[in-house]
């Protein structure tokens, strides 16, 4: 069983690469489930009408008024609309700049282009994920309280999930350049060398974040499940089902997600 427990009350678990249902319970009211590579509809329920379909329509609905959809691998523009007045779109595989534009200013996620890689979430406060800039690398979740993931800065590196209680990965010890929860679950963030997230299973489950070497997320199934982010060469997300499942982000070649 490959399962990531978030350490809060209730079932919070991501099953990866096992037979049967593969899903993640977020531990809040309602069904929150991510199906990966099963016969039935592959869908991430976020509560209500918020659902990520990974088959058929290939579209991420954010559950707000207006069209909020990320099309992956279908004919036409692949774009994430965030449902605000301006155009908010993430292009994944068109000739123009791959960028999430217009979230109330210059809020843009560059995927494999020169310059600062930063995602502003469009709230009043600064909610930004820096992916390899010199400044502080931090993801604010934009909810009440401090919800921030520090990636490779000096001091406490902690991810608050914004639910009741502290859900946080703390540095394993003084001078230790990684974060740990109970058990062999360790997240290496922004240090020289290997940057890796271990999910506590026997196999290697590792997320490389911005090192010179390969940046890759292994989901811990028998097959290769890997997300390479912004390095030269293959950038690919394998979902662990039969066939090629690959998302190319910001390489010269085609950028797409195969779901068959």
Image (cartoon, grey):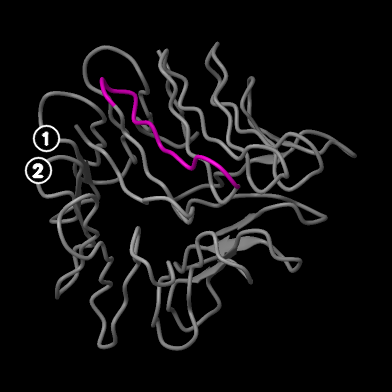
The quarter holding residue 246 reads: top left
Q: Is residue 23 above or below residue 125?
A: above
Q: Position of residue 80 (x, y in %)?
A: 28, 66
For disc 1, the marked residue is 41
Answer yes or no: do the residues labelled 1 and 2 have beta carbons within 8 Å? yes
Count residues near mark 1 (Cα–Cα under 10 Å), then give few for <14, some for 14-19, many for 20+: some
Is 54 in front, or is 9? 54
Q: Is residue 139 above or below residue 65?
A: above
Q: Position of residue 173 (x, y in %)?
A: 83, 34
Q: Which residues are magenta?
A: 232-243
- Residue name at image x 66 percent, y 49 percent: 210
For disc 2, the marked residue is 56
Callout in the foreground (1, 2): 2
The quarter holding residue 12 reads: top left
Q: Is residue 84 left or right of residue 10?
A: left
SS for tag 2? loop
Residue 210: in magenta span: no
């Amino acid at each position: 069983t490959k399962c990531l427990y978030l350490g809060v009350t209730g079932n919070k678990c991501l099953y990866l690469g096992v037979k049967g249902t593969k899903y993640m319970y977020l531990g809040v009211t309602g069904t929150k489930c991510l199906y990966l590579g099963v016969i039935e509809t592959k869908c991430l329920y976020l509560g209500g009408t918020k659902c990520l379909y990974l088959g058929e329509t290939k579209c991420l609905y954010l559950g707000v008024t207006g069209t909020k959809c990320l099309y992956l691998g279908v004919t036409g523009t692949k774009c994430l609309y965030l449902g605000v007045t301006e155009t908010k779109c993430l292009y994944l595989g068109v000739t123009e700049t791959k960028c999430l534009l217009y979230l109330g200013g210059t809020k843009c996620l560059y995927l494999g282009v020169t310059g600062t890689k930063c995602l502003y979430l469009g709230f009043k406060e600064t909610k930004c994920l820096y992916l390899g800039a010199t400044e502080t690398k931090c993801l604010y979740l934009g909810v009440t309280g401090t919800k921030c993931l520090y990636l490779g800065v000096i001091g406490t590196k902690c991810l608050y999930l914004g639910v009741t209680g502290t859900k946080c990965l703390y540095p394993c010890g003084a001078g230790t350049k990684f974060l740990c929860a109970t058990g062999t679950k360790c997240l290496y963030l922004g240090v020289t060398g290997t940057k890796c997230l271990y999910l506590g299973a026997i196999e290697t489950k590792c997320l490389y974040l911005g090192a010179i070497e390969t940046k890759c997320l292994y989901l811990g199934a028998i097959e290769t499940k890997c997300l390479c982010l912004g390095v030269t060469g293959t950038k690919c997300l394998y979902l662990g089902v039969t066939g090629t499942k690959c998302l190319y982000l910001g390489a010269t070649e085609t950028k797409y997600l195969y779901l068959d």
